[in-house]
Image (cartoon, rainbow, N blue to C red):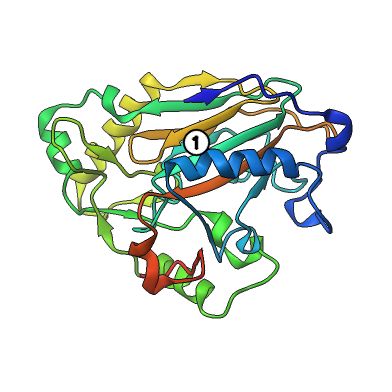
Amino acid sequence: MCVSGYRVDQTRLGSTPSHWRNRTGPSPAHREELLLMLYSSLLGDPFCWATQQDGRMIHDIVPIQGHEHEQLGSSSEALLTWHTEDAFHPLRGDFLSFACLRNPYGAATTVGYADELRLPDDLREVLFQERFVICPDESHLGKNNSRPTAGAFDTIERMQTDPDRVAVLFGDPEQPYLRADPYFMRVDDEDDEARLALDALVKAMDEVMFDVVLESGDFCFLDNFRVVHGRKPFKARHDGTDRWLKRINVTGDLRKSRAARDARAVRASR
């Protein structure tokens, strides 16, 4: 769902930061952040990860020099492949909220709905089984954070080296939820059936993905259990006018993460 029509004062906003770390004082987008937080609170409880953007509640999504070809929201020239946000984690958000501050060259967000997947019954059944590995994406690694939190990144390392096997589809067999991040997924070498099912899922989702071009003043809300998203490549200018989004993770049940968090910063423990 998108809400449009809010007017962003580009003069007040100033330049797009070259890195999410670069904010040293109050955000020039505090009005937009407040509105995004209020909207997000209608969906559930906003929360953050101790292992992502130094534990900030509201993320800055901006192109960063050196990240052009990475599978990160801060990339630009690479296709950011479709994914469930934080698919690797059992405490991932139920919803994602975005505010577009500027998008001068119309870089497209890609979106796809799980309800539109068309899969053979036998492969669909495999996707409901716990035969798939989803590793943490690179935004949760210590190299992409400046304030490592004691224990949090150790847990991420364990999730990389000894990950659980999970199902990709779950819930109602007729209208299942989806948990997938193909770029960071794998199956056991000998499990040809699971590999075939995963390949079929990727192909089926690729066929139903569509573009959403967010404009300045747009607020976008995604159901992280039913919708995957990505981003088309674009050429960043790094001149202060680049695409700039704000992002918030939202959970429908903050209590379920109680053992894994300090305040509302989830430590990514399992």
Task: Say left or right for 176 vs 8.
Answer: left
Between 98 and 151, the one lying in front of the other is 98
- Residue at the disc numbered 1: 81
Say which quarter of the image contains residue 202: top left
Q: Position of residue 47 (x, y in %)?
A: 51, 56
Task: Say left or right for 130 vs 180.
Answer: left
Question: Which residue of the protein is positioned furthest toward the bottom in this rendering?
Answer: 150
How many numbered marks appear? 1
Residue positioned 72% across, 26% down in the render:
103
- Viewer can see residue 243: yes
Between 7 and 101, the one lying in front of the other is 7
Task: Say left or right for 214 vs 84.
Answer: right
- Viewer can see residue 63: no
Residue positioned 53% across, 38% down in the render:
39
Quarter occupied by the C terminus = bottom left
Residue positioned 69% across, 47% down in the render:
67
Task: Say left or right for 12 vs 65.
Answer: right
Say which quarter of the image contains residue 148: bottom right
Give the amino acid type for the residue marked by disc 1 in the picture.
Thr
Q: Is residue 151 above or below residue 214?
A: below
Q: Is the residue marked by circle 1 packed among few (<14), some (14-19), or many (20+) residues within 10 Å?
A: some
Q: Is residue 152 above or below residue 264?
A: below
Q: Is residue 34 above or below residue 146?
A: above
